[in-house]
Image (cartoon, rainbow, N blue to C red):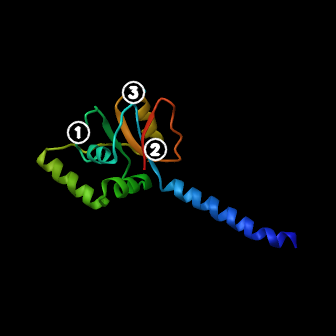
Amino acid sequence: MKFIFNIPLYVLILVMTSHTAAAQEEMLVVVANTNNELIKVSRRDIRNLFMGGALKHDLEAIILPSDNKARILFNTKVVGLTEARIQSYWAQMRFSGRKKQPKQIDDERKVIEYLKNNKGAIAYLPAGSDIPEELTILLKI
């Protein structure tokens, strides 16, 4: 009989932990190698930087491949465009020679290594990523 009364509690715990894990997957962090220099950036600043604009700070944007879940979330939540629209934009920029697309790195582990070794590099990663101490989280999305 005691087991029956605890079933709702177990179900509640299961739902809460799966919801927390799903929410964590839906979050991103923008991380940079700033040599521990404090930099304040807004979501708009990040959008502009990843779309080829300049910031007052000398930062190099790094992106993940188009099929990466973090990239899809970043494009949706920060840039506000679909992957197809972004690819069209970069095709126009390449053709006109006005802007250069950010450097693409194959996976999140390699992005972290690149960030660690390149001052001024900035990238977005899933919120659950293991971010080394020498990197600075600039924004949580």
Q: Nearer the viewer, residue 6 or 113?
A: 6
One can see residue 78 in this view = yes
Q: Nearer the viewer, residue 140 or 33?
A: 140
Q: Quadrant of the N terminus?
A: bottom right
Q: Nearer the viewer, residue 124 or 68?
A: 124
In the image, taking residue 138 as reference, residue 55 lies left or right, namely left
Residue at the far left in the pictured view = 96
Residue displayed at 14% across by 44% down: 98
Element carrying mark 1: loop
How far from the left and from the top, in percent, is residue 97? 13, 44
How far from the left and from the top, in percent, is residue 69? 44, 55
When the figure is inspected, residue 88 is found, relative to residue 125, above or below; the finding is below
Element carrying mark 3: loop
Residue displayed at 84% across by 69% down: 3
Q: Residues within 10 Å of mark 3 (few under 14, many from 20)?
A: few
Residue displayed at 26% across by 56% down: 86
Instruction: Kindly indicate the quadrant of the structure image that contains residue 67.
Output: bottom left
Q: Pick whichever of labels 3 and 2 is earlier in the sequence.
A: 3
**Residue identifier under label 1:** 54
In the image, taking residue 47 as reference, residue 125 lies left or right, namely right
Q: Residues within 10 Å of mark 2 (few under 14, many from 20)?
A: many
Discs 1/3, front: 3
In the image, which disc is placed on residue 43? Answer: none
Q: CA distance from mark 1 to mark 2?
A: 24 Å
What's the residue type where badge 3 is placed?
Glu
**Residue identifier under label 3:** 37
In the image, which disc is placed on residue 108? Answer: 2
Element carrying mark 2: helix
